[in-house]
């Protein structure tokens, strides 16, 4: 016999012929394989509070932090669950209880698999939350109740879904906080008071809880180590340098010294020693005993010296490095080994062709490599009017903190910025905003140092970039290959496949915190007279204007197509070629 339960009732069937099956894979084994941080981390963090309190925003922020650290985590949101698993449940006390029971069972399974499960549910009744706790306790799975304490008037003022307004009008019945009581947790593991506290600060409290409970390891602060002599010791160090045997270095060596000194290659403490060099050449990463993770490093940072230099420094424990006769650094505990130039070029560039400019530089360099810890006497300045733009990593981090950046997206280029570049930057920012970031900041990085003979010099590019910013083009780089010295040696004339850079970075060891956001291809839309994203179905309407062609137009005083570049920025390039300037 069957009974119609009616629209507000439902039949509940209890299965009696089932038993719990033990997994073949233990939690310890899962912990060895899941994520990039070893150890079993499975637990449930249960965020409870009024609708609009900020539970989901905080939970998803915590999830993002954990995943960035290489920890397996997943956020279960009340609305998301009710659209699927619990779509047949309403908001009566009975249905609310069943909603919490099902979610607790699911989160238990997530936690048992080694995930940190972040549940954000109003869950207004104390008894239901205690039931969720028992479900975990019975399986010896850690359960942390977090009360997101936001006053009703604040939640109602936010009312992002318009639910409070409907409840006040009587459209919604049994709405928690209006005509249904919310029972405050009696003994939560953590209370997060959100008034006057940002989402990031609230999330940090939960991260701290997980660290205190030994669910996750405390993260060592990744300090960018600068290699400058402390100000109070500079005079003494300069005096010492005068007494030391010295090695004269070139301009490229000085540039690498600046990279090391400012912390761009941290945790390196100087020019690479032989073991570090071999790790870089063969494995593309460094193993630092002071860090619990591998450090991605695919480029050797070494100092080549001559046979005469090798003989001169033998038996010395410290060496002065000089540029144009002026001491710039002290290198301590020197280590010298053979500079196998052909092997280095083959491993680093995939070619030994001397027509490659850096291969030529290496082949013409010294026969020995000198490694050791360095102490740089003073900050390296080039006195070319651009030093104010050369910020150190620590200075950039400080500036980003001042700007309250919650995400940073970097754009590096060696050409002037055209409207296609601007589109890509705008599109990336939009993607980050769509993902919930509030203040993503662009790090615009024009390449300095050595560039091609026909490239626009750095000083002019900086002026052009400033003009682009002044024209507000960036408010609200196409993939390019590296030409092979022998254009006929590869199918497309490139030394590397232009798409491989992004693919390799996503797989590189030691870069777990870096995310590649794929760019669309931008080109000039001849039909609509503006830069636009390339559409294959109307490819005949697009014109790919290369950097070489762009420079040619500026050099001959021609204007680019309308909408290709901000007029003020284009004028900077025209003026450069008109005046016949070239940086030294």
Image (spheres, helix red, strand yellow):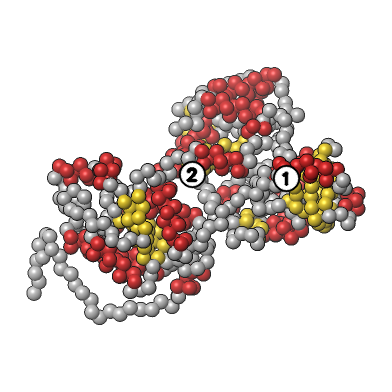
Of residue 361 and residue 311, the one placed in the foreground of this image is 311
Q: Position of residue 8 (x, y in %)?
A: 12, 60
Label 2: few (<14), some (14–19) or many (≥20) C-alpha neighbours in 10 Å = some
Q: Is residue 534 something one can see in this rendering? A: no
Of residue 236 and residue 56, the one placed in the foreground of this image is 236
Of residue 185 and residue 564, the one placed in the foreground of this image is 185
Q: Nearer the viewer, mark 2 or mark 1?
A: 1
Q: Position of residue 262 (x, y in %)?
A: 67, 44
Which residue occupies 71% across, 39% down?
379
List the single residue furthest toward the front: 232
Q: Which mark is residue 229?
A: 1
**Labels 2 and 1: the sequence-earlier one:** 1
Q: Is residue 165 something one can see in this rendering? A: yes
Which residue occupies 50% across, 46% down?
517
Label 1: few (<14), some (14–19) or many (≥20) C-alpha neighbours in 10 Å = many
SS for dot 1:
loop
Which residue occupies 55% across, 30% down?
418
- Which quadrant of the rendered structure holds the N terminus? bottom left
SS for dot 2:
strand
Please give the count of numbered marks on the rendered protein: 2
Quick check: 40 left or right of 144?
A: right
Which residue occupies 38% across, 54% down?
59
Q: Is residue 384 above or below residue 128?
A: above
The residue pinned by badge 2 equals 407
């Amino acid at each position: 016999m069957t009974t119609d339960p009616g629209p507000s009732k439902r039949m509940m069937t209890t299965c009696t012929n089932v038993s719990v099956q033990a997994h073949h894979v233990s939690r310890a084994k899962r912990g060895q394989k899941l994520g990039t941080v070893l150890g079993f981390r499975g637990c449930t963090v249960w965020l409870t509070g009024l609708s609009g309190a900020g539970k989901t925003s905080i939970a998803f922020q915590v999830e993002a932090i954990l995943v960035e650290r290489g920890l397996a985590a997943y956020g279960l949101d009340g609305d998301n669950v009710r659209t699927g698993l619990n779509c047949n449940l309403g908001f009566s006390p009975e249905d609310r209880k069943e909603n919490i029971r099902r979610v607790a069972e699911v989160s238990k399974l997530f936690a048992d698999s080694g995930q940190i499960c972040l549940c954000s549910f109003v869950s207004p009744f104390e008894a239901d939350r205690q039931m969720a706790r028992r479900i975990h306790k019975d399986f010896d799975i850690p359960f942390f109740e977090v009360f997101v304490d936001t006053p009703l008037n604040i939640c109602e003022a936010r009312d992002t879904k318009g639910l409070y307004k409907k409840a006040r009008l009587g459209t919604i019945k049994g709405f928690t906080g209006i005509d249904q009581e919310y029972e405050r947790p009696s003994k939560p593991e953590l209370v997060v008071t959100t008034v006057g506290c940002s989402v990031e600060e609230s999330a940090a409290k939960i991260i701290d809880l997980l660290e205190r409970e030994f669910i996750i390891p405390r993260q060592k602060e990744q300090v960018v180590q600068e290699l400058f002599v402390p100000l109070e010791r500079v005079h003494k160090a300069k005096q010492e340098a005068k007494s030391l045997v010295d090695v004269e270095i070139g301009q490229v060596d000085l540039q690498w010294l600046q990279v090391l000194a400012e912390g761009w290659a941290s945790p390196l403490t100087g020019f690479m020693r032989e073991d570090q060099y071999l790790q870089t050449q063969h494995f593309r990463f460094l193993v630092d005993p002071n860090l619990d993770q591998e450090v991605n490093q695919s480029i050797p940072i070494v100092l080549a010296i001559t046979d005469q230099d090798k003989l001169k420094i033998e038996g010395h424990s410290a060496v002065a490095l000089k540029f144009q006769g002026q001491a710039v650094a002290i290198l301590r505990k020197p280590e010298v080994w053979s500079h196998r130039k052909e092997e280095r070029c083959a491993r680093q560039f995939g070619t030994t062709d001397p027509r490659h400019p850096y291969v030529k530089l290496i082949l013409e360099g010294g026969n020995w490599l000198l490694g050791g810890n360095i102490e740089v006497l003073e900050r390296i300045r080039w006195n070319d009017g651009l030093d104010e733009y050369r910020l150190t990593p620590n200075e950039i981090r400080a500036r980003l903190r001042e700007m309250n950046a919650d995400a940073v997206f970097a754009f590096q280029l060696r050409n002037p910025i055209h409207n296609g570049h601007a589109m890509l930057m705008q599109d990336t920012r939009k993607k980050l905003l769509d993902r919930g970031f509030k203040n993503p900041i662009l790090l615009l990085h024009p390449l300095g140092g050595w560039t091609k003979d026909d490239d626009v010099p750095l000083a002019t590019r900086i002026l052009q970039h400033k003009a682009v910013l002044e024209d507000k083009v960036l408010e609200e780089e196409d993939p390019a290959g590296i030409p092979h010295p022998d254009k006929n040696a590869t199918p497309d004339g490139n030394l590397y496949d232009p798409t491989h850079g992004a693919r390799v970075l996503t797989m590189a060891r030691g870069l777990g915190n870096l995310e590649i956001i794929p760019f669309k291809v931008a080109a000039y839309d001849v039909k609509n007279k503006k830069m636009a994203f390339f559409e294959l179905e109307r490819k005949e309407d697009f014109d790919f204007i290369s950097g070489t062609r762009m420079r040619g137009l500026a050099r001959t005083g021609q204007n680019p197509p309308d909408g290709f570049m901000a007029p003020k920025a284009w004028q900077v390039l025209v003026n450069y070629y008109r005046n016949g300037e070239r940086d030294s």
